[in-house]
Image (cartoon, rainbow, N blue to C red):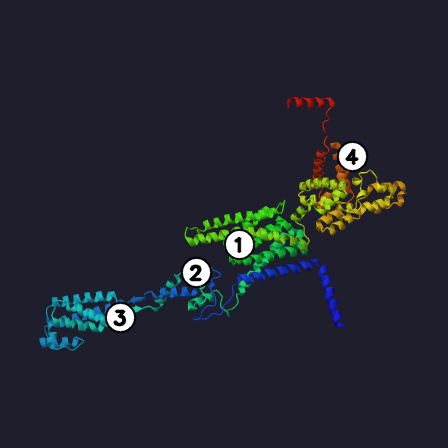
Amino acid sequence: MKTRTILGDIFNRSIAFKDNIKLQKLVLVVALFLAVYGLLVIVSMPARYDLTVGRPSPRTIYAPRDFVDEYTTEQFREQAADSVEEVYNYNPAVLERILREVGIFFDTVLEIKDDPDLEREEKVEMLQDEIPKKLPASRVEPLLTDRDTLRDLQERLNNSLQEVFEQGIYEGEIDSTMRRLSREIALYPFNADLKRIAEIIIEPYIAQNMIYDAQATEEKKELARSDVEPVIILRNTLIVSEGEPVTEKQLAQLEALGLIVGQQADYLGYIGLFVLLLIIFILVGIYMHIFVNEVFKSPTLLLLMGLIFIITMLFSVAATFFSGYLIPVAMGVILITVIFGYKLALIINMVLALMVGLITGGDFSFIMTALLGGLVSIYAVTRLSQRSDLARAGFFVAVTNAAVIIATYLFFGNVSLEYDSLLNFSYSMAAGVGNGLLSSVVAIGMLPYLESFFGVSTAITLLELSNPNHPLLRQMLMKAPGTYYHSMMVSNLAEAAAESVKANALLARVGSYYHDIGKLKRPFFFSENQLSGENPHTKLSPNLSALIIGAHPKDGMETGRKHRLPEVILDITVQHHGTSMISFFYQQALENSDREKVSTDKFRYEGPKPQSKEAAIIMLADAIEAGVRSLSKPTSSRVEMMIKRMIKEKLDDGQLDQSDLTLKELDQIADAFVYIMSGIYHSRIEYPEKALKAELERSSVVK
């Protein structure tokens, strides 16, 4: 019991889903969105690898996108920082101190030397006390020399000190500085003892005068680091080859690309792709709602469009393994144009070009080739006249792709006479030309299956139905020749009228061919096929005759279904009379019975009324062709008057209410009918018999 309840609930929900068009459309759009998103995630989000330093790589890995090589960049920055010289600050106080001390020493020596109250021995002793290092009296006595000598020594010593200290004394250079000063002092032109004393008095004051500035040095290094430009690794650059031991640098590069197993997923990338795809879907939905609402409202057509889009995407992904120029966007665009028309194809072409950008990593050349090739394919198949036009479209796409490839190579400066460059260019050209041919071939192959499976009618289907050798048309010519020629006349009228109001002229023409196929069931009950003059309706009641005549739209639909005519033709077949009156037999019934006993419902076609412009045009063309043919003297004025009167009658009877035809379009249709019918029933010049004979004789004499 519980199982039955569950199954019943599932059945009820499936019925509710089948009847809910909005829910069906929502499910289809969500499914299409998820399919495209999943495919783009697989293609545009790169795979991850389990790699360690020193172990061989399982495969060759290229950079999937441009990225900053932080590892190499950091190495260059450290090299730049290491090359920066350390910052030292000059301390002038050290030189000032030693010069001051030297000056004090010599001033003291001169003061002692010039003191008249001191004996020589006392002066020597006092000088010994002034010298930092104990020297014997004999070696100190030279200080008692003349004043000029001492001042000369002081000046030379000051100059040496100033020169050395201004050059800077760094940490650890005190001993070397002292040795340098000693060498310079040794060259002085003085007594050896004086030079030794000079060395002794300055030695305690030799000190570092270049002070290391750690903060300034670090700032300078940081500036050097910041001046280093980041190292950019371009897309498709080889990172590591298959079997090559992975280095620390390569592993760091792969980590920067997010290609190592265990790294955090690129959630921002997933979110960005989701939002981008969502924006595209919303904009396409708005466009379809405005410009191709008939597709937007139909779940079946949405499913067909989505299927073509997914198939094109799959072909595009497969093509990228060979070349981005081989991506067959034109294939999907050709199918969309043929099945749905150029308005939908334009927006789908743009979306597919964007998808190419996502699949190929934003390569401008591939995007332009896809976009322009798709536009050319739309132009090539907008007005099909035969199936070979699809192949011609492939040729146009191939030529366009070749031109775009040449232009992009020239624009980016990739043209060179080197072997590798020529080989790459040739490969790209072959892929671009092959793209156009592949697109048309696959589109031609897929189109019949899509038409059959989804029950859609394309221009190709209609062109095949217009073949006079179609079994139904041949059968009509043999069994109902009057109806056949009537249908041909109606087709001329309907095609001209459809062109005048921008309706589907091909559909109007082919629909006219088959609109009366229901008459094949009882051809001799229709006046145009009564060649012998015998009218079977004379033996029938008006009610029965009206029943037979009124059944031919329904009979036509049944006959068309047996011959697998598309639904759009069957719709015209059953709608081409709408719910019009069968006037002739209705009048007969009125004449034979009381008006009150005659029901008008029994003398009307079952309908429905025409639901499209093409069906309404065929209704008018059918009535007008028969009406004008019944005129005894079809002059231009009478023909025009009858055409306008019959259109007005159909309008007043409400037969055109559901066809979307405007009053302005009805005027244009009437003008087209008048033009065609006037050409058929134009007045001819009547030659008198005598004049005709004279004309013939003159012609024979001239010859």
Q: CA distance from mark 1 to mark 4?
A: 63 Å
Q: Residues within 10 Å of mark 1 (few under 14, many from 20)?
A: many
Q: Which mark is residue 550?
A: none
Q: CA distance from mark 4 to mark 2?
A: 86 Å
Disc nearest the viewer among 3 and 2: 2
User: Which residue is denoted by mark 4 in the rendering?
Assistant: 631
Q: Which mark is residue 208?
A: 3
User: Which residue is denoted by mark 2 in the rendering?
Assistant: 232
Residue 510 visible in the snapshot: yes
Disc nearest the viewer among 2 and 1: 1
Sequence-wise, the earlier of marks 3 and 4 is 3
To which quarter of the image does residue 231 belong?
A: bottom left
Q: Are marks 4 and 2 in contact (CB under 8 Å)?
A: no
Q: CA distance from mark 3 to mark 2?
A: 46 Å
Q: On the picture, is 80 further left or further right than 474?
A: left
Type of residue at label 2?
A: Ile
Residue at image coords 32%, 65%: 85
Disc nearest the viewer among 3 and 1: 1
Sequence-wise, the earlier of marks 3 and 1 is 3
Which quadrant holds the N terminus? bottom right
